[in-house]
Amino acid sequence: MGFLPSVPADPIVIALLGLLLSWALFCLLTRSKERAGKWPPGPAPLPFIGNLHLLDLRRQDKSLMKISEKYGPVFTIHFGLQKMVVLTGYHAVKEALVDSAEEFADRPPIPIFQRIQEGQGIFFSSGNLWKTTRKFTMSSMHKLGMGKKLIAKKILEEFSFLEELIDSFKGEIFDCEPFKLKLFNMAPTNVIFFLLFGERFDYQDPTFVTFIRLIDEVMVLLGSPFLHLFNFYPFLGWFLKPHKTVLVKIEEVRVILRKYMVASRQNISRGYVTSYIDALIQKQSEEPKEDTISQMKTLLPPSLTLVMAGTETTATSLQWAILLMAQIPRAKVQDELDRVLEKSRLPEYEDQKALPYTNAVVHEIQRFIALLPHVPHSTSVDTHFRGYFIPKGTPVIPLLTSVLLDKTQWETPNKFNPSHFLDADGNFVKKAAFLPFSIGHRVCIGENLAKMEMFLFFASLLQRFTFHPPPGIQEADLDITPQLTFTMRPQPQAVCAVSRS
């Protein structure tokens, strides 16, 4: 009997065969679903990479808007081997997230967040777990004062510390000293920490400084193109590094959270509930007893969500507000503040009605920056939408950037224009397409708090300070190109603050 000669396997050939096998399996698994109905149209995918060659991973939202010009407001896109449906424009997004809210209420399993949250928490969970966690969190935050006068008072108290910090930058030669935009992260971050931990932190506190650093580093890494590649091809995780670094830094955050959970158990034993973590501990004490490790695994995901998402969004929005006010004429805002408010008193949240232009500027900042371009949803059941069939479990991208820049909803969508929120008489008007916090069942849980923080911090800062570029830099030279992170952050740069007093 003859024997075939032994030929050493070529790793490249094996890899290529593996990729082709993966593609064939993907096509086989999706074909049966396609027979149930017509999928939305979209560009033809290439083997293995899908439509990634059509996307700028730094600005996926802009690439998807470009593709929608050809295929319409509902189209199919392939992120590598993952088939997704994209919704663009106000009407398509509203129809899905409001009119068909239950069908589009789930989240798809995103590899990096599966590693971080294990399908738990408020943001990336689905089904009954998500509904229960969200309901509990909203109830707890309401009891702790979110959206009430108590939290408004805390915001203004926090502003006094921020004002003191800004004043400390006065120079001996110039009337102002340049400082980095990241300084404005501190105040809104402390508001979230007050809700989470029941106390504020000194800006020099080592725990506070560590939290700020970790949040910053994680958000930058989450926007890395290599992390996107990990989400598209999780089996290549051994080859890619950013997701490993993210998990290390997330564990550092968990270590700090565990420390506060131990303190919260002591509060609960004395009958005190002064924070969200206290409320979580108390809630779990009412449930069937579990070992400490299991309890920690259940408690950490919602706390981690609020720490990371709750601090990043408002803090980054405030950075944008200051940068834009250093570049765009801010005199009309300050004239209105001077006219309506006594110089000795800080604005209150109820002053929005008497400050229509200031309120319009705050809203336009949030529209213009499109802070969070999209967070994927997924279909909870087989769904028919606008004549197309979308199988259960299909990832769906409601593209919020396309809503905030929708040409049918905004007169000058790509320009900063406060008149978008003003009528002919200068009164503030609400706009249905103003959806920076999304809409429907998955609307941002901290929307009311974020709106209050933005208005009070912005109005207080513009009342007390004038912001402009550092000496030698023209207003037009300030860079308003977004930086690539999990959110659309401004580029690191300096501004000056001059006290108006």
Image (cartoon, rainbow, N blue to C red):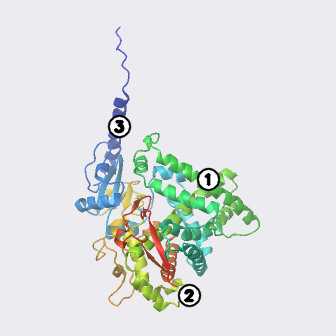
Q: Residue at x 59, y 61 (%)?
A: 209
**Image point 29% across, 49% down: which residue?**
53
Q: Is residue 10 visible?
A: yes
User: What's the distance in space between the residues labelled 1 and 3, CA to CA?
Assistant: 36 Å
Residue at the image point whose x is 60% and y is 80% from the top:
153
Q: Residues within 10 Å of mark 3 (few under 14, many from 20)?
A: some
Q: Residue furthest right?
A: 270
The amino acid at mark 1 is Lys
Quarter residue 24 falls in: top left
Foreground residue among 403 and 106:
403
Which quarter of the figure is the N terminus placed in? top left
Q: Give how far across and how far down residue 244 sits, in percent.
A: 51, 46
Give, as a three-letter code, the residue at label 2: Arg
The residue at the point 35 percent across, 68 percent down is 477
Where disc 2 sits, the SS reads loop
* Image location (x, y in percent) of residue 87: 33, 62
Amino acid carrying mark 3 in the image: Leu
> Is residue 355 visible to us here?
no
Residue 120, position in %: x, y? 54, 56
Q: Which residue is mark 1?
A: 297
- Residue furthest to the top in view is 1
Tell me which label, 1 or 3, sits earlier in the chain.
3
Q: Which residue is mark 2?
A: 345
Closer to the camera, 463 or 420? 463
Mark 1 or 2, nearer chain start = 1
Q: Which of pointers 1 and 2 indicates the residue nearer the eye?
A: 2
Which residue is tagged 3?
19
Which mark is nearer the camera, 2 or 3?
A: 2
Q: Quadrant of residue 423?
A: bottom left
Which is more N-terminal, label 3 or label 2? 3
| Left or right, 281 with reference to 346 | right
Query: Few, some or many C-alpha atoms within 10 Å of disc 2 (few <14, some 14-19, many ≥20)?
Result: few
